Amino acid sequence: MSCFDHASAERLLQEVFAPWLQDLDLAVERIDGDGAILRMPFSDRLCRDNGVVCGQALMSLADTAMVFAVAAASGGYRPMTTIDQTTHFLCPIAKANVLAEARVTRLGRSVAFGRVEITAEGDTRLAVTAQTAYALLGEAR
């Protein structure tokens, strides 16, 4: 099994994801054995008309963070596709950077399951949770 470290994660962020997702300016905060933490900096461009970060941006962050968690648990990036994401919005995030902590809960040969917890930076309250499932389409590289 290869090693998926912070440098590998930074390369993945630049090489695999669509340009519109790169426009979110995500940063990899931490990679470990079965998880990852990503940061999405606050931007007015991500907000609804009431100044709250929109759900679409938060769901994209959750989905992306889990790709990194699966790569960490697999020892390298594996081509995958989302087959399910159930998201619960518990409280709004406004005018704050956003942190997404993704953890793999089960890694099989062809499917991975995980959980993402999203908070506003500096606030310990859970703002968003997501339960996810991914079809694994190839071997780690």
Image (tube, rainbow, N blue to C red):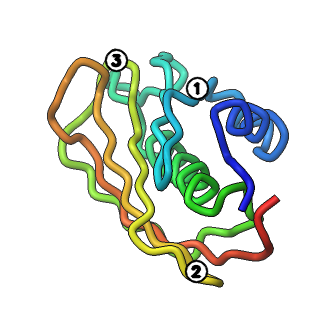
Please tell me which of labels 2 and 1 falls first in the chain.
1
Residue lying furthest left: 125
Residue neighbourhood size for the residue with mark 3, other residues' Cα within 10 Å, grouped as few (<14), some (14–19), many (≥20)? some
Which callout, 3 or 2, points to the residue nearer the camera?
2
- Residue that numbered label 3 is attached to: 96
Residue type pointed to by label 2: Val
- Vertical relation: 35 (above or below) 79: above
Residue type pointed to by label 3: Ala
The residue shown at (45%, 37%) is: 37
In the picture, measured across the screen, residue 65 lies left or right of residue 19, that is left
Percent position of residue 16, x then y: 81, 46
In this view, the residue in front, 37 or 23, is 37
- Image quadrant occupied by the N terminus: bottom right
- Residue that numbered label 1 is attached to: 27
The residue shown at (63%, 24%) is: 25
- Residue that numbered label 2 is attached to: 111
Disc 2 element: strand
In the picture, measured across the screen, residue 102 lies left or right of residue 16, that is left
Occupied quadrant, residue 23: top right
Inter-mark Cα distance, 1 to 3 = 15 Å
Percent position of residue 106, x then y: 44, 74
Residue type pointed to by label 1: Ala
In this view, the residue in front, 31 or 22, is 31
Residue neighbourhood size for the residue with mark 2, other residues' Cα within 10 Å, grouped as few (<14), some (14–19), many (≥20)? some
Disc 1 element: strand
Percent position of residue 136, x then y: 68, 75
Which callout, 1 or 3, points to the residue nearer the camera?
1
Please tell me which of labels 3 and 2 falls first in the chain.
3
The residue shown at (49%, 19%) is: 41
The residue shown at (38%, 53%) is: 116
Q: Residue 86 carries which label?
A: none
Percent position of residue 139, x then y: 79, 71
